[in-house]
Amino acid sequence: MFIKIVKTFLIALSCIITLGVVNAYVFVPDLQRHGEIVAYRGGGSAVNYEKLKKTGCTAL
C-alpha cells in the first residue's frame, strides 16, 4: 500500500514538473514578445511615462 502511494506521488510530481518546464519554454516567451517595457527599477529618467500612460499602469 505504501509503495502504491509513493508511486502515485512520484507520477503526480513528475507531471507537475513536466508541465512547469513546458510552460517555461512555450508560453512565457510568447508573453515576453507581446509585452512592452515601460519602466526599469530605479525610476528617474529610465521611466517612459508616455508608454506608461498608454498601458493604464498605475504603479511606478
Image (cartoon, rainbow, N blue to C red):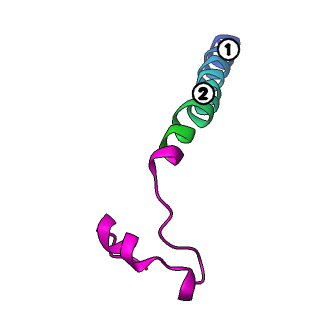
SS class of the residue under badge 1? helix
Please tell me which residue is depicted at 51% across the width and 45% down the height of the picture. 33
Label 2 neighbour load within 10 Å: few <14, some 14-19, many 20+:
few
Please state the horizontal and vertical placement of residue 42, each as a whole percent of the image: 60, 83
Quarter assignment of residue 55: bottom left
Which segment is the magenta one?
Answer: 32-59
Question: Disc 2 marks which residue?
Answer: 22
Q: Please, which residue is most extreme toward the bottom here?
A: 44
Q: Earlier in the sequence, mark 2 or mark 1?
A: 1
The circle on residue 7 is 1
Please tell me which residue is depicted at 56% across the width and 80% down the height of the picture. 46
Q: Is residue 24 visible?
A: yes
Q: Amino acid at mark 2?
A: Val
Label 1 neighbour load within 10 Å: few <14, some 14-19, many 20+:
few
Quarter assignment of residue 57: bottom left
Q: Vertically, is 55 above or below 19?
A: below
Q: Amino acid at mark 1?
A: Lys
Please state the horizontal and vertical placement of residue 17, each as a whole percent of the image: 64, 29
Q: Nearer the viewer, residue 9 or 56?
A: 56
Asked if the stretch drawn in magenta spans residue 55, the answer is yes
Please tell me which residue is depicted at 61% across the width and 37% down the height of the picture. 24
SS class of the residue under badge 2? helix
Q: Is residue 43 visible?
A: no
The circle on residue 21 is none
Q: Nearer the viewer, residue 51 or 14?
A: 51
